[in-house]
């Protein structure tokens, strides 16, 4: 019988200190760890990094080209800036009043951006963070697919499908008419990480990212709650899962029925968009039972059906095989599809943020139920998302990239106009220029409010105004008002300064 060879003892003596690598050694060790990653992981991690960098660069150019606006990027900037300067989430409304942002959306996540804004005081902080965060969502997508589909190559298909999916792209780089940054877009990667941590039975890590996700918008706690329900049924850990379900739903109820009405002063926030279906959460429930035809009439439009197809179609119905997980998309889906305004049911907006994570994850688990055909089905999903992914904000970003160059005459005029306004003074500005003047306590939207503004900055060609003719007439009236002196005019960009002799507040105000 052969004896096993003696294995040498490679342990260090008890008293011998372990040799610590120097700086060069640590860099070499880090590089070797990267090289040790499997090829699919390197592809996904590298692609996510490049994706985030590309979208951050496009968003930066878009902002520098004056394509972002007071609504919404400027309102987020002002809330963060005011919090940094001691006024918690305060902003200026369209009517010119000061208000706490929580009356419009419960997104205290903005407070977490204050330290970053302290380090780099620029609106670009927000758009760069948004692009990088959404790109990072490719990681849990890849991990989840690799775990359940068993092949790194197939998991790469899913990571790419997530990245090229139009709803993902428009959350990473918002180019809709209310351009800029939205805290709820950060919920996309956070909810994907939450799903991954639940799938790994890591409740503490889940609780951290779930809490962060819930702070991005009022309906997201309910999405987190449905994740708890899915986990309870799937893992049979009823106490934890059902606790998450109850707390999540309660959080959304409190946000809608307590927090927002408290700061708004009434419970009529939903009246305009949802008037046709009840006007309030309780009214919608009542309408569903007393007049279901009104609900059907609002939902069954060509525009909304196209939105549903673009959103759910590329995943080939795989999400139907994991319906409990898909329920996490229900809060945002219902809020969007019941709205009387077309924005929430447009892929180019951020309103899909609460839908994308559950849709992608449920589709992965649905594909896992067809394990024998997982590779082929996953490739078809990638192909389908790539086809619809042609509808992309990258096109708009590239179109406006040249406008950000200092040599552009219109860009130079806007930059010069902005530079004339002293820091901190109250100002009224047109929508797109207002996006660059929001780092102050008071900034009003012209022509809806002027009040105590000392400066007015307007762009006659601002395309975000619905009634451009009326808007330009107000500017003409402003030019004839003795209370204001025009101090700058170039390429349709005008700057007015309030004169000492005049005290009129009616110039151009609503």
Image (cartoon, helix red, strand yellow):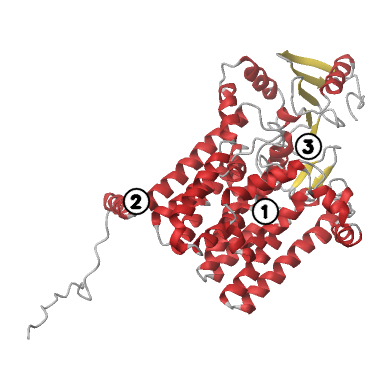
Give how far across and how far down residue 148 sits, in percent: 47, 64
Report helix, strand or loop for mark 3.
loop
Task: Single out the mark in the foreground, 1 or 3.
Answer: 1
Asked if labels 3 and 1 touch by Cβ distance under 8 angstroms, the answer is no
Residue 442 is labelled as 3
Q: Around disc 1, counting alpha carbons within 10 Å, would you say few (fewer than 14), some (14 to 19), or many (20 or more)?
A: many
Q: Residue visible at 50% across and 47% down?
A: 382
Residue 204 rendering spot, x and y as whole percentages: 55, 69
Q: Which residue is mark 1?
A: 216
Query: Does residue 142 appear to the left or right of 453 in the view shown?
Result: left
Kindly give the residue lying farthest to the left in the view shown.
1
Quadrant where the image shows the C terminus = top right
Residue 501 placement (x, y as % from top left): 90, 19
Answer with mark 1 or mark 3, whichever residue precedes in sequence: 1
Q: Earlier in the sequence, mark 2 or mark 3?
A: 2
Q: Secondary structure at mark 2?
A: helix
Would you place residue 130 above or below residue 194 in this image?
A: above
């Amino acid at each position: 019988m052969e004896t096993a060879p003696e294995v040498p003892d490679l342990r260090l003596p008890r008293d011998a200190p372990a040799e610590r690598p120097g700086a060069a050694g640590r860099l070499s060790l880090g590089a070797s760890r990267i090289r040790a990653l499997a090829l699919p992981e390197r592809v996904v991690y590298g692609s996510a990094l490049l994706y985030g960098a590309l979208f951050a660069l496009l968003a930066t150019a878009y902002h520098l080209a004056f394509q972002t606006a007071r609504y919404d990027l400027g309102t987020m900037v002002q809330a963060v800036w005011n919090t940094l300067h001691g006024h918690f989430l305060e902003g200026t409304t369209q009517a010119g009043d000061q208000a706490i942002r929580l009356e419009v959306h419960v997104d205290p996540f903005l407070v977490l951006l204050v330290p970053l804004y302290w380090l780099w005081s620029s609106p670009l902080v927000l758009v760069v963070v948004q692009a990088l965060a959404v790109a990072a969502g490719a990681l849990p997508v890849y991990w989840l697919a690799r775990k359940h589909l068993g092949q790194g190559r197939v998991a790469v298909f899913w990571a790419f499908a997530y990245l090229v999916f139009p709803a993902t792209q428009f959350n990473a780089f918002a180019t809709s008419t209310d351009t800029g940054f939205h805290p709820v877009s950060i919920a996309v990667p956070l909810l994907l990480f939450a799903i991954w941590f639940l799938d790994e039975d890591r409740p503490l890590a889940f609780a951290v990212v779930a809490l962060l996700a819930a702070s991005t918008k009022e309906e997201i706690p309910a999405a987190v709650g449905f994740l708890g329900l899915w986990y309870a049924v799937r893992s049979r850990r009823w106490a934890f899962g059902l606790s998450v379900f109850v707390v999540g739903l309660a959080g959304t109820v409190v946000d809608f029925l307590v927090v927002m009405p408290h700061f708004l002063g009434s419970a009529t926030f939903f009246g305009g968009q949802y008037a046709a279906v009840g006007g309030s959460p309780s009214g919608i429930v009542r309408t569903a039972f007393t007049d279901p035809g009104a609900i059907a009439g609002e939902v069954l439009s060509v525009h909304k059906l196209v939105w549903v197809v673009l959103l759910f179609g590329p995943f080939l119905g795989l999400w139907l095989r994991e319906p409990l997980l898909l329920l996490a998309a229900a809060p945002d889906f219902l809020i969007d599809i019941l709205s009387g305004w077309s924005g929430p049911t447009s892929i180019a907006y951020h309103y899909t943020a609460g839908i994308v994570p559950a849709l992608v994850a449920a589709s992965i688990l649905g594909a896992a139920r067809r394990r024998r055909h997982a590779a082929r089905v996953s490739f078809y999903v990638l192909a389908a998302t790539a086809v619809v992914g042609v509808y992309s904000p990258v096109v708009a970003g590239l179109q406006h990239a040249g406008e950000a160059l200092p040599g552009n005459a219109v860009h130079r005029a806007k930059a010069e106009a902005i530079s004339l306004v002293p820091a901190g003074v109250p100002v009224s500005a047109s929508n797109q220029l207002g996006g660059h003047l929001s780092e102050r306590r008071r900034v009003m939207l012209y022509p809806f409010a002027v009040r105590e503004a000392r400066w007015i900055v307007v762009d006659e060609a601002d395309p975000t105004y619905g009634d451009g003719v009326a808007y330009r007439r107000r500017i003409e009236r402003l030019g004839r008002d003795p209370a204001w002196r025009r101090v700058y005019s170039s390429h349709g960009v005008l700057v007015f300064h309030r004169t000492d002799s005049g005290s009129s507040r009616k110039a151009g105000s609503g």
